Image (cartoon, helix red, strand yellow):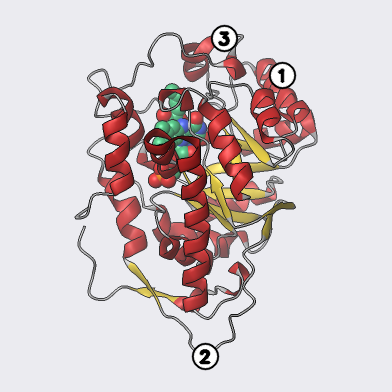
Amino acid sequence: MLTPDPLESAAREALSPESFAYIAGGSGDEVTLRANTAAWRAYALRPHVLRDVVETDLTTTVVGTPLAAPIGIAPTAMHKLVHQDGELATARAAAAAGALMTVSMFANHSYADVAEAMDGAPFWAQMYLLRDHGLTRELAVRAKEAGARALVVCVDGAAVPRRSRFAGGAFVPPKGLAFPNVREIGLTKAITGLDRAMTFDDLTLFPEWTGLPIVVKGVQRGDDAARCAAAGAAGIVVSNHGARQFDGCTPTAAVLGEIVDAVAGNAEVYVDGGIRSGSDGVKALALGARAVFAGRPPLWALAAHGEAGATAWLHDFAEDIARVLAFCGCRTPGEATRDLVARAWPPPHG
Ligand SMILES: Cc1cc2nc3c(=O)[nH]c(=O)nc-3n(C[C@H](O)[C@H](O)[C@H](O)COP(=O)(O)O)c2cc1C
Ligand SMILES: CCCCC(=O)C(=O)O
């Protein structure tokens, strides 16, 4: 991008070069990584004027869970890389801001410990299906017992990614980090143990095991999203994993509308990838997302300014969405409709 993100720059100062590269980086030549942010900027908003926007209300629900604003923290691994309190800090920040927390399978704290830190505030638990279905079942049941409101089943792990910023193609975490959600097998065996034979039929395993609704994360096409909804998914996260799995796929901003149309109201649709500002968020809402998720920005805020920084970032993001909605003549996220979004002209640089 032409203007470096000041928060990202501050985080770079605070982190080891390896940790920074792990979080910031993508796969391959990072074309999709750049496209994820650029694609939101390739849309422009067409605001309505002269609408009474005195009574604004950002509240919403995601799979029935009430939120103060339509925003969430995407599941990201190893928050202890950036802060001593790890996911406990991010989770408390989400709780304070009324945003949804998603806890990664590769968190440095267990789902239960994160739940305790959140004191009843809502969180979702992200997991992959392992070849060892029995172990995945135990993980899913632990997430349910911890109080997760939904399971986020990530489906974009069909092969091992090659992360170009690392000589061996992968980040090697520093010794001493705990991965309690996968304590039976450890991080390496969990990562190499993903079930690559997984199909749409396997999605029903998770509700069978737990009774919890599932949100399928990592869908990039309308036809696939429709099949997930038909398989019983309550939600779909349109995501290319922050461009970290493989390079050269579509930026999420470009496929969100197609997916919303294909799902046709049979599941809620959310999106992540390159969403950095209130304008980006409102474009996503206008294209039909019910809520938006951010991966890197809350980590940058946590790294640079601690738990209070993560809380402040979430508050600011929500406030920015409210401001842009008001400028567009909308009092609520639901009032943002697709006619608000146009192709930007002139095309943005970067
Ligand atoms: C450091 C890092 C770790 C991640 N770990 C996970 C993970 O454990 N599980 C998962 O489903 N997605 C993971 N993701 C992907 C995010 O959930 C999300 O899709 C992505 O970060 C969104 O893009 P953004 O960072 O541009 O907001 C990770 C992303 C980052 C940056
Ligand atoms: C090391 C665990 C993998 C976490 C992940 O999904 C990512 O780095 O994108």
Q: Which residue is mark 3?
A: 185
Q: Dot 3: few (<14), some (14–19), or many (≥20) neighbours within 10 Å?
A: some
Q: Neighbour class for label 2 at 10 Å: few (<14), some, many (≥20)?
A: few
Given residues 58 and 302, the one toward you in this image is: 302
Q: Amino acid at mark 3?
A: Ile
Question: Which of pointers 3 and 1 lies earlier in the amino acid sequence?
Answer: 1
Tell whether label 2 touches label 1 (CB within 8 Å). no
Question: What is the three-letter code of the residue carrying label 2?
Answer: Leu
Q: Residues within 10 Å of mark 1 (few under 14, many from 20)?
A: some
Q: Position of residue 86 (x, y in %)?
A: 51, 26
Residues marked 3 and 1 touching at CB (< 8 Å): no
Q: Residue furthest bottom?
A: 50
- Asked if the residue at label 1 sits under 8 Å from ligand 1, the reply is no
Q: Is residue 48 above or below residue 111?
A: below
Residue 100 x, y percent position in the rendering: 61, 45
Residue drawn at x 78%, y 31% is: 210
Q: In this figure, which residue is indicated by the disc labeled 1?
A: 138
Spatial distance from mark 3 to mark 2, Cα to Cα? 59 Å
Q: What residue is at 62 percent from the left and 64 percent from the top?
A: 58
Which image quadrant is residue 118 in?
A: top right
Q: Which mark is residue 50?
A: 2
Residue 27 shows in this picture: no
- Ligand 2 is found in the corner quadrant, namely top left
